Amino acid sequence: MADRALVSAFAPAKINLYLHVVGRREDGYHLLDMLIAFAGAGDRITVAPAGDLTLRGDGHFATGVPGGEDNLILKAARGLAALAGRPPEAAIHLEKNLPPASGIGGGSADAAATLRALEELWGLSIPRSELRGLALSLGADVPVCLHGRASFSSGIGEVLNAAPPLPETWLVLVNPGVPVSTPAVFTARRAGFSDPAPFDTPPADAAHLARLLAERSNDLEIPARALAPEVGTVLEALRRSEDILLARMSGSGATCFGLFGTEKTARTAARNIASAYPGWWVNHSRLLENAE
């Protein structure tokens, strides 16, 4: 099949609605239990035919994207080309809107969007099991970003089970501009392990979802706050917002989110926080069940 002319894929922010550390493997990797959904905020990957592999970025956070061999977008492109037995030829453009190293899976989402876009551009039909294996080799969060649907994630991130339907909910995402290292957060963690806590009851509304999440936690928040006290400042700012249902850190931080029942209350909270803290990244968007 001939290459298509141009393909674009959305790379939404990944939101850990809760995150429990439930164990540790002999190789040192932690075992997790998480509910992951997506936000209406995100990056965008656009790919076009080319004679070699190139990556160009723009957007507010383009300068924070690592280049060279460590770039997940280029790793994803080379890995997919190897699976397909074809040369890794594409011009890739990244519109980088999400802050890097921020606990909302920006790099993982970009890699997953690259796989989706290039599979279409190159006219491929890779077996799903092989594509999931490639995604996991790129990073623990890439499989759920590739799956693109609200899911309970376990193991080190490779085991995905469908979450019940989520109600209409609005998010305010806030990042104080402080990068947080995921390995450093896990190293700093001193607490014991939590129990897995998936649920199968569809929340009736945003308030019900918030109550379910309040019975759970993000086990990485305490070590993240020790490494980056700004996380606590962000959470306090969110909790002062009128009509907020829940405030929590996502992933290993430093991005935190607030849950709201309406777009109006989320928009007002985002505007107030951005006004009070003009150096922060603040976004309000809908909580998505599906990434596309």
Image: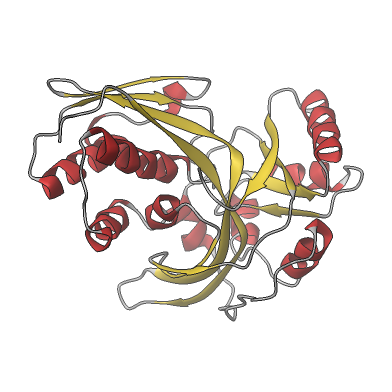
> Would residue 219 be visible to someone looking at this image?
yes
The residue at 22%/49% (across/down) is: 125
Residue 152 is situated, as x and y percent measured from the top left of the image, at 53, 67
Residue 193 is situated, as x and y percent measured from the top left of the image, at 56, 78
Q: Residue furthest right?
A: 242
Q: Nearer the viewer, residue 74 or 28?
A: 74
Residue 181 is situated, as x and y percent measured from the top left of the image, at 47, 47
Quadrant of image for the N terminus:
top left
Residue 70, quarter of picture: top left
Q: Nearer the viewer, residue 67 or 185?
A: 67
Residue 19 is situated, as x and y percent measured from the top left of the image, at 58, 65
> Would residue 70 be visible to someone looking at this image?
no
The residue at 68%/29% (across/down) is: 280
Colour pattern of the rendering: secondary structure
The residue at 30%/59% (across/down) is: 132
Residue 214, quarter of picture: bottom right
Q: Is residue 6 left or right of residue 207?
A: left
The residue at 35%/31% (across/down) is: 66
Q: Is residue 122 left or right of residue 15?
A: left
Q: Is residue 224 left or right of residue 280?
A: left
User: Does 80 appear above or below 177?
Assistant: below
